[in-house]
Amino acid sequence: MCRETALSGFICCLKSKESLDSRILIPNSGGIPPLVYLLSYTYSETQQHIVTALLNLSLDEANKRLIAREGAIPVIIQVLQYGTEEAKENLAAALFSLSTLNENKVLVGCSNGIPPLVDLLQTGTSRGEKDVAMALFSLVLNQANRSKVINAGIIPPLLHLLKDKTLDMMDEALSILLLIASHPEGRNEIGRLTFIQTLVEIVRDGTPKNKECAMALILELGSNNSCLLGALQYGVYGHLVEITKCGITRAQRKVNSLLHLMSKSEHIPFVPRK
């Protein structure tokens, strides 16, 4: 018990997000390797302290490389599978922080870190979902990770996030989907009618940002003629005309692009909107 108490005392100075000095002094004093070593420590309270410490250390740009260099990412992924719920959610936030570096995006993907994040997106608490979604968004900015998230089964939980407005996760879900839609497998999954109907509903009822992102997704899927036809069947044309009346220039550009694409497919006559 003395060891746990001493360790807690050592780590307490790292737990504050305002502890800027500690983020510099601890790495310079060789403090990161023992933290990484102890991350797999099974005593849950100690593990939680270490997770919080690594998260806050990772907020410093120079520490992101140091933490990864000491082998933290495979250990983080292991704890993501077997740790406490609180530890998992904080580690998702740490992975988001670490993965702002492209080399760490690659390392997470190659270390099979995406499946446990997708699992956590489905089973975690509402408090942790945003951190998990942001970690996944950061990871899919790397093109090689897009097939990995699709194979890990990310599409159904993203559809759930779109449909359940109480979760307030539509922006995050749409942003991830827009990146995934650039991958052929992603386009096939998102191009199913259930998704098209949901996207059309967002074009009708979403916030301006949601509407624009949903239209961008439909545009991305536009190479598939059946997706455009499905969107028209669900009434997207009328919603596009309504958006032209709101005076939002960026949204109107998306509207014109969609109408032009539909006219090329001979589904509607193209009448440019000012």
Image (tube, rainbow, N blue to C red):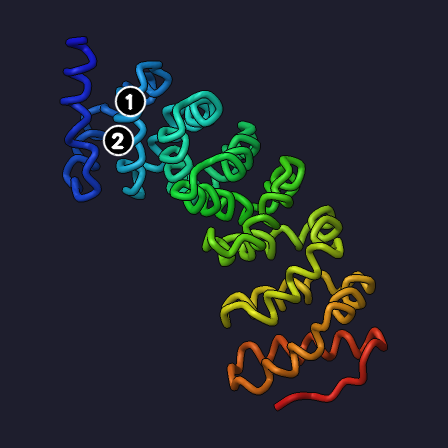
Give the residue drawn at x 83%, y 76%.
267
Q: Is residue 249 above or below residue 110?
A: below
* Callouts 2 and 1 close, C-beta under 8 Å: yes
CA–CA distance in space, label 2 to label 1 = 8 Å
In the image shown, does 229 or 55 lie closer to the viewer?
229
Q: Is residue 182 visible?
A: yes
| Quadrant in the picture for the N terminus | top left
* Kind of residue indicated by mark 2: Ala
Give the residue drawn at x 63%, y 35%.
152
- Answer with mark 2 or mark 1, whichever residue precedes in sequence: 1
Give the residue drawn at x 36%, y 35%.
90
Q: Position of residue 129 (x, y in %)?
A: 45, 43
Q: Which residue sits furthest right?
A: 266
| Quadrant in the picture for the C terminus | bottom right
Give the residue drawn at x 51%, y 39%.
121
Image position of 223 (left or right of 204): right
Q: Position of residue 183 (x, y in %)?
A: 69, 50
In the image shown, does 61 or 192 lie closer to the viewer?
192
Report helix, strand or loop for mark 2.
Answer: helix
- Give the residue number, with chain letter if any, for mark 1: 35
Q: Is residue 245 above or below residue 40?
A: below
Image position of 195 (left or right of 133): right
Q: Is residue 118 above or below residue 79?
A: below
Label disc, if present, on residue 53 of the rendered structure: 2
> How many marks do you count on the picture?
2
Q: Is residue 135 above or below residue 53?
A: below
Report helix, strand or loop for mark 1.
Answer: helix
Q: Residues within 10 Å of mark 1 (few under 14, many from 20)?
A: many
Image position of 156 (left or right of 29): right
Q: Position of residue 243 (x, y in %)?
A: 59, 80
* Kind of residue indicated by mark 1: Leu
